Image: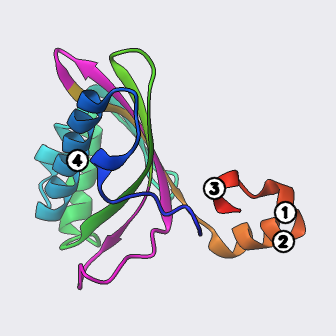
Amino acid sequence: MHNLGTTACTTVPTAAPQSAKEICDLLDELTSAWGRGDADAYGALFTEDATYTSFVGTYYQGRTDIIEGHRALFAGFKKGTKLTDSILGIRFYGTDTAVVTSRGDTYQDDPTQPADMSKTQTYTIVRQDGRWLIAAFQNTQRKNVMERISFLYDPATRPAAER
């Protein structure tokens, strides 16, 4: 993987730096809430009608569903985990909508050891009542071996940033 993104969200080039900073702050809040295992704070960063698709394909609809699903995760097999995130891009569509793409992963033990960044995420973020919130989230598990095979089989399928 060549395109690792940047962990310093505010360094991502964008046409709207102030809004980008606000979005970076939102993503920092999201990471912090996950690290505390705080499902209520995590869910509060989503719109009331948000959608959330996990890397295994689980589809949550609405803030309450997201909160309750994460309450179970934080009490269960994701207990004690933290998030790592690397921003690939922030694109604005008007003044109140942005799409953020990132690589990320969870880790449990040593935060100084980089995670595999085994997931690629897409956030649709909207401004409601002067506050940025996540309206949709898609988390896709990267299949590194399959990706490499497809690039070897047909090099033209390799994205420009991966050449």
Asked if residue 45 is among those painted magenta in the image, a careful observer would answer no
* Amino acid type of the residue tagged 1 in the rendering: Pro
Left-right relation of 99 to 65: right
Left or right relative to 138: residue 134: left
Q: Which mark is residue 68?
A: 4
Q: Nearer the viewer, residue 88 or 30?
A: 88
Distance in Å between CA atoms under marks 4 and 1: 43 Å
| Region of the chain picked out in magenta, as a range | 103-131
Residue at image point 33% right, 48% down? 11
Residue 161 - label: 3
Does residue 25 lie above or below 154 as drawn?
above
* Disc 2 element: helix
Question: What x and y, as percent, mark residue 25?
Answer: 19, 42
Which residue bears the numbered disc 1? 155
The front one of 11 and 84 is: 11
Kind of residue sitting beneath label 3? Ala
CB contact under 8 Å: marks 4 and 1: no
Could you give the CA–CA distance between mark 1 and mark 3, rounded to whole angstroms? 13 Å
Cα distance between the residues tagged 4 and 3: 37 Å
Q: Alpha-carbon neighbours of circle 1 within 10 Å: few (<14), some, or many (≥20)?
A: few
Considering depth in this image, is 52 or 113 the residue closer to the camera?
A: 113
CA gap between label 3 and label 2 equals: 16 Å
Residue sitting at 63 percent across and 68 percent down? 143
